[in-house]
Image (cartoon, rainbow, N blue to C red):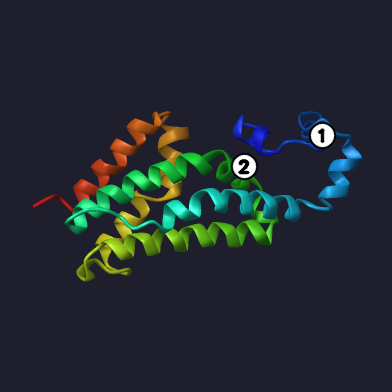
Amino acid sequence: MMDLTRAGEVSPSAEAVAVKAGVGRRTVFRLFSDMETVYREIHQVMMGRIEPVFRAPLEGRSWRDRLDAMIERRAKIFEEILPFKTAADTQRHLSPFLQEDHAQLARMTRQMLADVLPKKMAPGSRTFEALDAALSMEMWQRLRHDQSLSPKAARAAMKHMAGALVPRP
């Protein structure tokens, strides 16, 4: 299912998953009794890939240097999860697990931003909230899908937005 999703299938059928895995449809249904189970399995695999990247300390002498490093890191993480997030968003309204997963990603990215910015730009401040929106997964999806930017161009656009909100001294 992950291979099919990565290839652009937002909602692969059980038949397509079975063919890709080289097993019968019954095997797919026996292993995964419902879609919540599938979502949890994909979540576990993806968290194993991205959590170490999220948790690694950000390098930089100043908070602004660390903000730039954070944007680089987010671009890497967001690009890794983009096909899965896009697929999950189509089913989120039906899935309590996907709703919580979405909220968890928002909490993780907000905390990462809060850890980088000086106290005067704490959560709740206009600058923090604007940066959180400009550097969000939703913005990455817009830049990559709706505006058809390459990962490099999307990363540059995010850095430009951050620079407009908090210019370098």
x and y, in percent, of residue 19 in the image: 81, 29
SS at badge 2: helix
SS at badge 1: helix
Residue drawn where x is 75% and y is 54% of the image: 37
Picture disc at residue 139: none
Residue at the left extreme of this rendering: 169
Closest to the observer, 101 or 61: 61
Answer few, some or many: residues within 10 Å of disc 2's Cα (few below 14, many 20 plus, some between 14 and 19): some
Quadrant of the image containing the N terminus:
top right
The amino acid on which the numbered mark 2 sits, given as a three-letter code, is Ala
Picture disc at residue 18: 1
Closest to the observer, 75 or 138: 75
Residue at the right extreme of this rendering: 26
Q: Are marks 1 and 2 in contact (CB under 8 Å)?
A: no
In the displayed structure, 112 sits above or below 80; it is below
Answer few, some or many: residues within 10 Å of disc 1's Cα (few below 14, many 20 plus, some between 14 and 19): some
Locate residue 161: give its quadrant.
top left
Residue drawn where x is 46% and y is 54% of the image: 52
Residue drawn where x is 73% and y is 50% of the image: 38
x and y, in percent, of residue 100 in the image: 59, 62
* 3D distance between C-alphas at marks 1 and 2: 18 Å
x and y, in percent, of residue 90 in the image: 63, 45
Q: Image check: 7 left or right of 132?
A: right
x and y, in percent, of residue 92 in the image: 63, 53
Badge 2 is on which residue?
Answer: 87
- Of the numbered discs 1 and 2, the one sitting upstream in the chain is 1
Q: Image check: 67 left or right of 25?
A: left
Between disc 1 and disc 2, the foreground one is 1
Q: Image check: 30 left or right of 151?
A: right
Closest to the observer, 142 or 113: 113
How many marks the image carries: the answer is 2
